[in-house]
């Protein structure tokens, strides 16, 4: 794959580590905002399809090595009392893990609902420099 020269758009003061963290934040934000609001039903086939589809879409982004999405089934409404009933994906339902590799930096990041914060937290769990 030919090398791009996207680096000319970034400050030369930015370290590889900072850029890797920036790229990670972009991917986590994208993942969250793509999923939020999608209609969903407590149906394994539908849930699996959404998980795999979004994993595939996010994996297309630059520097993504892998992504795993899990929608918490017991937080998805199951009873469809009328034709118009459905649930939608919120931050309380999304759990995701993403691995980013930028230059010599590897990052493992997560998105998950944190009860004590009452917030879908996106965070870097691990950051390593390749030897």
Image (tube, rainbow, N blue to C red):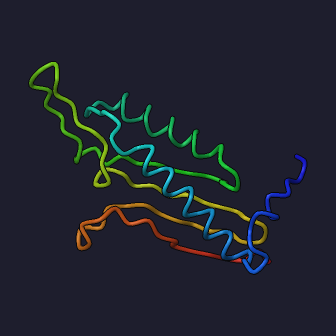
Q: Residue at the spot x=51%, y=51% of the render?
A: 30
Left or right position of 61 against 118: right
Front in this rendered view, residue 68 or 16: 16
- 48 vs 117: above or below: above
Which residue occupies the extreme left position in the image?
A: 81
- 86 vs 21: above or below: above
Which residue occupies the extreme top position in the image?
A: 83
Name which quarter of the figure residue 63 lies in: bottom right
Q: Percent x, y for residue 101?
A: 70, 63
Q: Residue at the spot x=48%, y=56% of the render?
A: 29
Left or right position of 49 against 44: right
Q: Percent x, y for residue 68?
A: 51, 50
Q: Percent x, y for residue 53?
A: 51, 35
- 30 vs 105: above or below: above
Q: Percent x, y for residue 100?
A: 64, 61
Which residue occupies the extreme right position in the image?
A: 2
Left or right position of 90 against 48: left
The C terminus, quarter of image: bottom right
Left or right position of 38 against 9: left
Name which quarter of the figure residue 5 lies in: bottom right
Q: Residue at the spot x=50%, y=37% of the render?
A: 52
Q: Residue at the spot x=31%, y=33% of the render?
A: 39
């Amino acid at each position: 794959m030919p090398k791009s020269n996207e680096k000319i758009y970034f400050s030369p003061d930015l370290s590889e580590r900072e850029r890797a963290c920036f790229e990670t934040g972009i991917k986590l934000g994208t993942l969250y905002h793509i999923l939020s609001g999608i209609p969903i039903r407590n149906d394994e086939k539908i849930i699996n399809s959404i998980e795999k589809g979004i994993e595939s879409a996010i994996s297309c982004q630059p520097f993504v090595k892998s992504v795993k999405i899990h929608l918490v089934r017991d937080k998805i409404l199951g009873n469809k009392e009328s034709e118009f009933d459905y649930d939608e994906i919120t931050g309380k339902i999304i759990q995701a893990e993403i691995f980013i590799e930028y230059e010599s930096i590897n990052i493992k990041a997560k998105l998950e609902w944190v009860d004590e914060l009452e917030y879908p937290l996106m965070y870097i769990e691990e950051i390593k420099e390749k030897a």
